[in-house]
Amino acid sequence: MSNMLRVVVDGIYRQGRHNLGINLVAENGQPLPCWQPGAHIDVHLREGLVRQYSLTGHSENTGHYQICIARDKQSRGGSRYVHDILRPGQVIDISPPRNLFPLTLAGKVILMAAGIGITPLYAMAQALETAGVPFVLHYYVRERGDEAFLPELSQPFQHGFCEIWHSSEGRSPRNHVPAELLEPADDTHLYLCGPEGFMAHMRTTATQHGWHEENIHIEAFKPLTTALTSGNEESFTITLASSGQQWPVPPEKTIATVLLENGVDVPLSCEMGMCGACLTRVAAGEADHRDTVQSDAEKSAAEQYIALCCSRSLSRNLVIDL
């Protein structure tokens, strides 16, 4: 916990029908570390409950951090804790910001968000406006009243604009394709954030209309479907490059679980392949990548990194740099 930042919940406020905005300030009153749009933090809500949330708002403001959290009916604890238990004045620990979804200042940027996926894209819109980069933000919600940051997004921008679409009024992501998605260009980049189905649909639509993969950027708030299916998995051996120690990894266990059971310290956070905390260099063997942190290019690069919390091995033995 030595690299953790101790912060105070400075305010909690309603952001649409199902979301809460949270302001965090340093307990010692000092500025918080700088961050760029797309960055997220690990939030230690209580012992054993750590969740990742995107920073949002104006990235140049280091006097406080702003996050926004939806009430999730499928909550594994984080959303429920924030909405039902977290209160102003409470002191919690957070990690320094990490950015696995960086913004590229292209000739033009198309931002497409669904639901709480607006959080990093709202920060990107603010940064693009400041930088004078043309942009369009398409924001999909179920019905009026669900929008987060509605007053801010309703203000006129000098360099872009925001369109808010409501599924209840016939403008769902499934049946509505913005004109910008039909007009790919080499100097235009597309950023997608929201539920898995939304991102997969928009990505497929974009590629079908000629978008290059390298111009499409995705942030996942939930892991893409990579769950272990013990009936179809093969066992393999995990070996530590530093000591030569090795252990079998059975179908029903992750690499991280096996390492922890054998006294090897593993930096874990989301445990879903989303945050990158447990990425470890592969010294030998072939990884079976199941994370959503790394790009396709990174997963096929000469130097490989594996997410110990979810990925497996295609080779009988996998040697990792621990």
Image: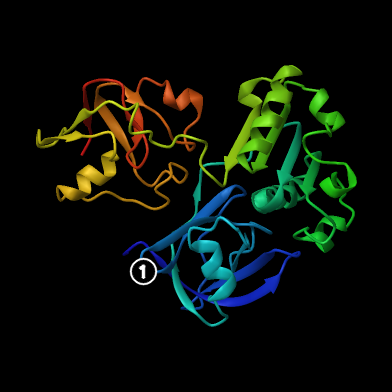
Q: Residues within 10 Å of mark 1 (few under 14, many from 20)?
A: few
* Camera-side residue of 197 and 134: 197
The x and y percentages for residue 240 are 16, 35
Residue depicted at 21% across the width and 21% down the height? 316
The C terminus - image quarter: top left
Can you see residue 105? no
Vertical position of residue 256 compared to residue 35: above or below: above
Residue depicted at 45% across the width and 73% down the height? 92
The N terminus - image quarter: bottom left
Residue depicted at 38% across the width and 47% down the height? 277
Quadrant in which residue 47 is drawn: bottom left
Left or right of 253, for residue 295: right
The x and y percentages for residue 301 are 41, 21
Helix or strand or loop: what does disc 1 sit on? loop
The x and y percentages for residue 239 are 16, 32
Residue type beneath disc 1:
Glu
Q: How many circles with numbers are drawn on the protein?
A: 1
- What sort of colour scheme is used for the picture? rainbow
Left or right of 230, for residue 53: right
Vertical position of residue 133 compared to residue 179: above or below: below
Q: Farthest residue in the bottom direction?
A: 89
Vertical position of residue 227 compared to residue 126: above or below: above
Left or right of 215, for residue 255: left
Quadrant in which residue 232 is drawn: top left
The x and y percentages for residue 179 are 87, 29
* Camera-side residue of 159 and 38: 38
Can you see residue 175? yes
Vertical position of residue 258 compared to residue 231: above or below: below
* Camera-side residue of 219 and 311: 311
Query: Which residue is labeled 1 in the image?
Result: 47
